[in-house]
Image (spheres, helix red, strand yellow):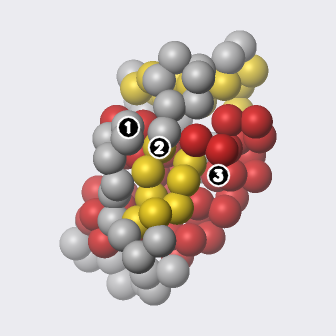
Amino acid sequence: MVSDGNITISLERCQVAVGKKEISLTMTECSILACLVANQGGTVSRKELILKVWGESFAGKPTTVNTHIQRLRRKLGRVAKALQTVRGQGYRWKCAR
């Protein structure tokens, strides 16, 4: 279980709750979000996300991460502002409180 006070992520059940509202995410989206929230405040590069979420056998394009981040932002609603792009470096989760 990963949490920042406003969002709670259960990787085992792939459940995400913003406050008391449950949000439906894919396993990939859930894994990306958990990685970012666990590294709260720190920047996670696209390469790091690929290794942590898909593993070394990833054969897709690195821009796949961008697509998943975009979908996450759409699904997260009001707390999406916590998911920040750090230009030229990657992504970071800044506490949504």
Q: Residue at x 67, y 35 (%)?
A: 79
CA gap, disc 3 and disc 2? 12 Å
Mark 3 surroundings: few (<14), some (14-19) or many (≥20) residues within 10 A: some
Q: Secondary structure at mark 3?
A: helix
CA gap, disc 2 and disc 1? 5 Å
Q: Is residue 31 visible?
A: no
CA gap, disc 1 and disc 3? 16 Å
Q: Position of residue 5 (x, y in %)?
A: 52, 17
Q: Residue at x 32, y 47 (%)?
A: 42
Checking the image for residue 93, the label placed there is: 2
Q: Which residue position holds label 3? A: 72
Q: Residue at x 52, y 61 (%)?
A: 85
Q: Residue at x 43, y 81 (%)?
A: 62
Q: Position of residue 74 (x, y in %)?
A: 75, 52
Q: Position of residue 18 (x, y in %)?
A: 66, 25
Checking the image for residue 84, the label placed there is: none
Please tell me which of labels 3 and 2 falls first in the chain. 3
Q: Secondary structure at mark 1?
A: loop
User: Which residue of the protein is positioned furthest toward the left in this rendering?
Assistant: 56
